[in-house]
Image: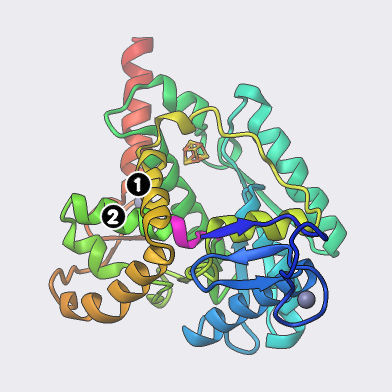
């Protein structure tokens, strides 16, 4: 975890490891003291190293980036836009309008994404789930499905990202999931003893030709508070209001456990996530081999006959019929 230490003369004797400027940041898990400029350089190099270490991007790749407007995806948008020349690939930003009118959340988020893309000279693609699939999170929430709203929302986002990536002939789908998110997911899957999801855990998800575009998480080894600090140092505009449905998210509650763990032992999340991926995941390979089919309705990948997205649409359609008849 990272502590933001005040810069200036008061920090007597605390200077940046790399230059003579006073230190502005102390990275707790490594004890590194750095000034603002060297923190940003350290941050960018670390993300670049993660991309290279896990072979996330190859020369000539088209990378579809899901940008929600939150700090993680906005920082990733800026970082990937910068890396385009170094790694020789193309980034394609995509905003999914989830139809959250409560607090104008979707509208505000869309505007933030559009403005950031404009600054970077990138064209943004916008998918309105209401227009394309007749769905909206506001509407689904009123249906009181058994599944938590954030889980349904996650399903929709994964589906739309994959479908659009196939339409755009993208080689990868990138998302802004950070180290704290990954540690939380790992904890949740351990608690649920979900071997299937544990065996798929990692920074890179492989592609399935014509069905599933490979997924990458460039912030797999980057702490959330490092991302916040980078966004603030760079004065980036991002949505800093919470989604009106986020209170219900179990993951937010589990995330506080990861934060506590970091307070007790800095670097725990990094050790846990890296260690699981490197040492434990290989032991689970082949534990849950599942056959992938094409959904009978939409032709997207599924392990059953009809994919979860189409089943969700059917369930909602049935509910509308039963309330109108
Ligand atoms: Fe979707 Fe839940 Fe995130 Fe809101 S908090 S955008 S409902 S996943
Ligand atoms: Zn420095
Ligand atoms: Zn389907």
Residue 196 relative to residue 256: left or right: left
Q: Which mark is residue 187?
A: 2
Q: Which residue is mark 1?
A: 257
Q: Which residues are magenta?
A: 176-180
Is label 2's Cβ within 8 Å of ligand 1? Answer: no
Q: In the rendered image, which quarter is residue 82 located in?
A: bottom right
x 63%, y 47%: residue: 70
Q: Residues within 10 Å of mark 2 (few under 14, many from 20)?
A: many
- In the image, residue 69 lies in the stretch drawn in magenta: no
Image spot of residue 121 (x, y percent): 85, 64
Q: Report how many numbered discs are placed on residues in the image.
A: 2
Which residue is situated farthest in the left direction here?
A: 287
Residue 39 relative to residue 195: left or right: right
Q: Is residue 15 visible?
A: yes
Measure how far apart labels 2 and 1 are at the Cα level.
9 Å
Residue 183 relative to residue 227: left or right: left
State if disc 1 and disc 2 touch (CB < 8 Å). Answer: yes
Residue 148 relative to residue 166: left or right: left
Figure quadrant of the C terminus: top left
x 55%, y 56%: residue: 224
Image spot of residue 7 (x, y percent): 77, 59
Image spot of residue 273 (x, y percent): 36, 68
x 82%, y 60%: residue: 9
Q: Nearer the viewer, residue 126 or 265?
A: 265
In what element is the residue under mark 1? helix
Q: Nearer the viewer, residue 66 or 242?
A: 242
Q: Is residue 66 visible?
A: no
Which residue is situated farthest in the front direction here?
A: 12
Q: Which mark is residue 38?
A: none
x 68%, y 82%: residue: 89
């Amino acid at each position: 975890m990272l502590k933001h230490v005040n810069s200036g003369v008061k920090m007597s004797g605390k200077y940046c490891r790399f230059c003579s400027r006073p230190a502005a940041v102390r990275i707790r898990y490594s004890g590194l003291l750095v000034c603002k400029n060297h923190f940003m350089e350290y941050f960018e190099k670390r993300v670049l190293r993660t991309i290279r270490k896990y072979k996330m991007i190859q020369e000539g790749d088209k990378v579809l980036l899901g940008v929600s407007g939150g700090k993680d995806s906005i920082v990733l948008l800026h970082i990937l836009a910068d890396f385009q020349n170094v790694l020789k690939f193309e980034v394609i930003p995509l905003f999914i309008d989830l139809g959250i009118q409560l607090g104008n959340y979707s509208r505000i988020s869309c505007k933030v994404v559009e403005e950031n893309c404009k600054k970077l000279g990138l064209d943004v693609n916008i998918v309105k789930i209401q227009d394309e699939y007749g769905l909206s999170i506001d509407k689904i929430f009123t249906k009181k499905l058994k599944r938590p709203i954030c889980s349904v929302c996650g399903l929709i986002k994964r589906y739309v990202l994959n479908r659009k990536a196939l339409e755009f002939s993208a080689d990868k789908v990138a998302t802004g999931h950070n180290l704290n998110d990954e540690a939380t997911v790992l904890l949740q899957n351990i608690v649920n003893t979900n071997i299937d999801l544990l065996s798929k855990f990692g920074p890179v998800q492989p592609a399935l030709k014509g069905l599933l575009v490979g997924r990458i998480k460039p912030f797999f080894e980057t702490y959330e508070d490092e991302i916040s600090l980078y966004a603030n140092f760079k004065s980036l505009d991002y949505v800093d209001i919470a989604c009106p449905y986020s209170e219900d998210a179990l993951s937010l509650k589990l995330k506080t456990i990861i934060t506590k763990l970091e307070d007790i032992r800095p670097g725990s999340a990094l050790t846990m996530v890296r260690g699981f991926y490197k040492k434990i995941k290989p032991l689970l390979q082949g534990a849950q081999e599942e056959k992938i089919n094409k959904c009978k309705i939409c032709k997207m990948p599924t392990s059953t006959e009809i994919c979860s997205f189409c089943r969700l649409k059917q369930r909602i359609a049935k509910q509308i019929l039963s309330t109108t008849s």
